Structures are given as C-alpha cells and as structure tokens.
Image: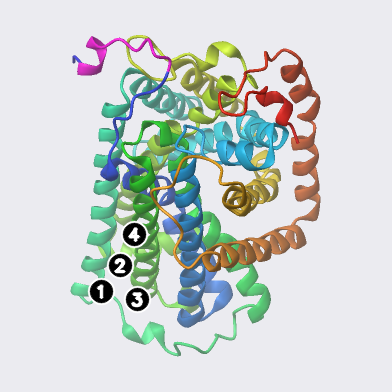
C-alpha cells in the first residue's frame, strides 16, 4: 500500500495539521469507551442497589466531564500544541511541574495502560480461540507494535483506522441496546423500585463514593485528544466541539448500556462484574453469548488502544522539544511527518511492561496523582486568563468561571474519595512522581536556554 504522505518532505520539524472534527471525536469516544462499559455498571448497580442512583452517578460524572471539556477546550484554543496537559502545565505552572507530569506519563502510566489494554484484548481473544499464556502475550505485543507502525507511517491512516473502529464500536453498542429492548428480552420490573435501594446494597454514601470513582475512570481519557492539538486543523474551534460532542456520546452510551443490562438482568442476580456480563450475553444471544461478548469487547478495546497510542507519544515529543527529554525524540520523521521516535518509545516501554505482566497494581499507585495533575491543569485556566497567555482563543468558556469551578469542586471531591480509599497508594504515587525532580535537574542543566522572541529573555529563566 502506498500512502500519499510518503511523497512529501517534512523538513520544518513540526507535525502537519491533517485531522478534522470526526477524527477528534473518535479520539474522545474511542479512548473513553473500553472494557469498562461492560464491567463498571455491574459493580455500581450492585453497590448502589437503585437504578435512580446509578443514573445520578452517570449524570454527575457526565456533568464533570462536560465542565472539564469546556475548560480544556479553552486551554486547547489558547495553546494549540501537541502535548495536552503537559503544555497547559508548562504554560501556567512552569517547567518543573510540567516535567513531573510527563515523567509520570512516560515512566509507567501511559505505557502501563497501553500494556493493560493490549493484554486485555489478547485475553478475550484467547477466550474465543484457546491460546497458551505465552502466545496470548505475543498477540498483545503484536497489536501494540502494529498500531505503533500505523502511527509512524501516517497520522491520517491511523486516524482513519481509529474512526472506523470507533464507529463500529458505537454501532455494536447501539445494536445491543436496540436488540435488548425491541425484542423484549428483559423485564421493566427490574427497575422497580426505581429510587429505593435494595436490602443487599451498601450504605448510600460509601456506595456513591465508590460508584463516582468507578464512573470517572470509565469516562477516563476524554482529555487525551488535546495531546494531538498540533495535528488538528483549526484546533481552537475543532477541539472544544470534539470534546463536548465526544463526552455527550460517552455519557449517552454509558446510561443506555447500563439501562439495557439492568433490563436484562435483575439486580438481585448480580454477583460479580464478569458473571453480570455473561448473564446479559446469555439473555441476548443464548449459549454463544460469552463468545459474542468477547468479540465485542475486542472491538471496544482495540479502538481505545488505537486512540491511546495515537495521543500518548505526543507528550514525550513535546517534552523533548522543550529540552526535558532526549533531544532525538523531538525530531519529526522526514518522510512520514510523524514523531516516530516518540512512538517507538511508547511501544518499547509498553512491550517491556507487557512481558513483565506485573504492572496492574503499579498503575493504581499513580491514579491519585494523575487526577491532581488533571485538576491542576484545569485550574491553570485562571492563570492563563489573568496573564492573557497563549494565542487569542477562538473558543471561550461560556458562563466563565462557573463550569471551571464545578469541574474543580467535583475533582476535589474525587481526590478526597481516592485518598480516603487508598491513602498508601496515593502517597506512594506522589513519592515516585517527586522522585523525578533529580531527573528534571539533570535535563535542565543540559538544556540550552531559548530566547522568547516577544519577551526577549530566556524561557528557562521563567522556572517557577
């Protein structure tokens, strides 16, 4: 196959803006909707014991995500560079804080999530076609490198693959909802009582806390589309629209899929996440339900993995451009116009973690600090507006600062819940991230200061 991009030369050292609104929406919905769409509703429904409170949790997290999309939409309009949160922290909090975020992403979080998704996909493939553990890992690693190669060769082709897998995923999930309701395969009595809780449910406040955390991470990743800002056409207008539309799609999908699952399986029969999926699959498709659902999960995870591998390497690329990572990683491939070495870094670390296979618990240590950075970047909009930082934004948050305040209040609540649930993990995650400070100092000593053409002084002197 010959890709048109191969015939061009990219000597400017900057990625080209080739992606439109459809690709950006696919990046939001594609990364957010993964295997959690099948596993999270069961645990939430069982602990809450009420369809009403389950709906309230999804709506609350949807509101959080919409307010976050408005916040990040304006930040993306002000700072339309590859890197997303890293760039926003760099511009509003300084190089040190931005580096610590990038250090966390590079060290384990993004490669760890990549490895987890790839091995999860492979494990569902092994359910359909019985495979040995070694061969299952090989499939996971092969998927990682296949998507990395696609992203190196062409951002347009990889975006097209992401769009098709995302639309396929949304189509399949819509089919499940329509199939379940239209054929009357369940019972509306499963929603009664609608607001009252079942005797087997947890006390309401602890149940709401656990459900909010689970729902937030089921939505996780909608902000990652900002990492490819430098490759989006008219990012000031496209990214805010993509985030808002993408979040609306994700919220609708989680509510409707949760509803059809409750319609198919009474709450009293829910024993675990896995059995809940098996029960729903059996009602929908009979005895082959498990295999059918495994195939659906593979499609969902593949789309999410494609979005993650597209977005994550742009953070390493942006760090290298700023002298905070290996200089060679900042180079754009002269033939393909992509940050090829940054993508190779992502593939290499992800593959090593996949081979090790003991990274799931390590990832959990970084969840708290990842949410801290997410909130801190959002709060940076206050600073950006006060300083008038960045380009004149094509998008400004409506009703400012109300959505930003709602976003920060809900994120603070989430942090309290996370710290209260796993204080040891939160502290360890913070400690490991802070261990990146000596690494930052080493890169900073080797960085040649660049002169800001407007301010006429070295950017490195702006360190906070």
Q: Where is residue 24 in the image (x, y as percent from the top left)?
A: 34, 43
Asked if the residue under mark 1 is in contact with the one under mark 3, i.e. CB atoms within 8 Å, the reply is: yes
Which residue bears the numbered disc 3? 263
Asked if the residue under mark 4 is in contact with the one under mark 3, i.e. CB atoms within 8 Å, the reply is: no
Which residue bears the numbered disc 2? 283
Q: Residue drawn at (29%, 49%), measured in percent from left and top?
A: 169
**Mark earlier in primary sequence (3, 1):** 1
Distance from disc 3 to disc 2, alpha carbons, whole Å, reads 10 Å
**Mark earlier in primary sequence (1, 2):** 1
Mark 4 closeness class: few <14, some 14–19, many ≥20 residues within 10 Å: some
Q: Position of residue 417 (x, y in %)?
A: 70, 64
Q: Give the range drawn in magenta.
A: 3-13
**Mark earlier in primary sequence (3, 4):** 4
Q: Closer to the camera: disc 2 or disc 4?
A: 4
**Mark number, residue 391:** none
Asked whether 343 or 236 is in front, the reply is 236
């Amino acid at each position: 196959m010959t890709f048109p991009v191969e015939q061009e030369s990219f000597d400017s050292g900057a990625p080209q803006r080739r992606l439109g609104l459809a690709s950006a929406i696919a990046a939001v919905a594609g990364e957010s909707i993964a295997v959690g769409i099948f596993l999270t509703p069961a645990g939430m429904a069982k602990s809450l014991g009420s369809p009403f409170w389950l709906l309230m949790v999804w709506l609350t997290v949807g509101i959080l995500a919409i307010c976050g999309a408005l916040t990040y939409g304006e930040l993306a309009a002000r700072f339309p560079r590859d890197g997303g949160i890293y760039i926003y922290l760099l511009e509003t909090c300084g190089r040190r804080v931005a580096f610590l975020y990038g250090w966390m992403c590079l060290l384990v979080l993004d490669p760890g999530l990549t490895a987890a998704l790839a091995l999860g996909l492979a494990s569902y493939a092994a359910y359909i076609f019985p495979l040995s553990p070694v061969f299952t890992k090989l499939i996971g690693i092969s998927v990682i490198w296949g998507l990395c190669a696609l992203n190196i060769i062409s951002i347009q082709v990889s975006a097209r693959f992401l769009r098709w897998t995302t639309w396929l995923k949304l189509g399949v999930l819509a089919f499940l909802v329509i199939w379940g309701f239209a054929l009357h395969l369940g019972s509306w009595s499963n929603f009664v009582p609608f607001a009252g809780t079942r005797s087997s449910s947890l006390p309401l406040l602890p149940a709401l806390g656990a459900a909010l955390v689970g729902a937030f991470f089921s939505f996780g990743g909608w902000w990652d589309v900002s990492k490819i800002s430098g490759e989006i056409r008219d990012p000031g207008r496209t990214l805010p629209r993509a985030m808002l539309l993408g979040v609306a799609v994700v919220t609708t999908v989680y509510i409707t899929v949760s509803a059809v699952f409750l319609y198919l399986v009474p709450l009293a029969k829910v024993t675990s996440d896995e059995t809940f999926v098996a029960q729903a699959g059996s009602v929908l498709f009979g005895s082959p339900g498990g295999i059918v659902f495994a195939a659906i999960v593979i499609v969902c995870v593949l789309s999410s993995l494609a979005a993650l591998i597209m977005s994550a390497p742009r953070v390493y690329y942006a760090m290298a451009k700023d002298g905070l990572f290996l200089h060679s990683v900042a180079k754009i491939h002269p033939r393909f116009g992509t940050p090829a070495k940054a993508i190779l870094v992502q593939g290499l670390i992800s593959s090593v973690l996949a081979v090790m296979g003991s990274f799931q618990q390590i990832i959990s240590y970084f969840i708290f600090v990842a949410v801290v950075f997410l909130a801190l970047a959002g709060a940076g909009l206050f600073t950006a507006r006060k300083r008038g930082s960045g380009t004149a934004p094509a998008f400004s948050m409506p009703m400012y600062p109300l959505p930003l305040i709602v976003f920060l209040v809900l994120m603070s609540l989430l942090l309290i819940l996370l710290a209260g649930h796993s204080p040891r993990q939160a502290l360890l995650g913070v400690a490991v991230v802070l261990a990146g400070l000596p690494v930052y100092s080493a890169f900073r000593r080797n960085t040649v200061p660049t002169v800001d053409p407007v301010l006429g002084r070295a950017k490195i002197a702006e360190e906070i």
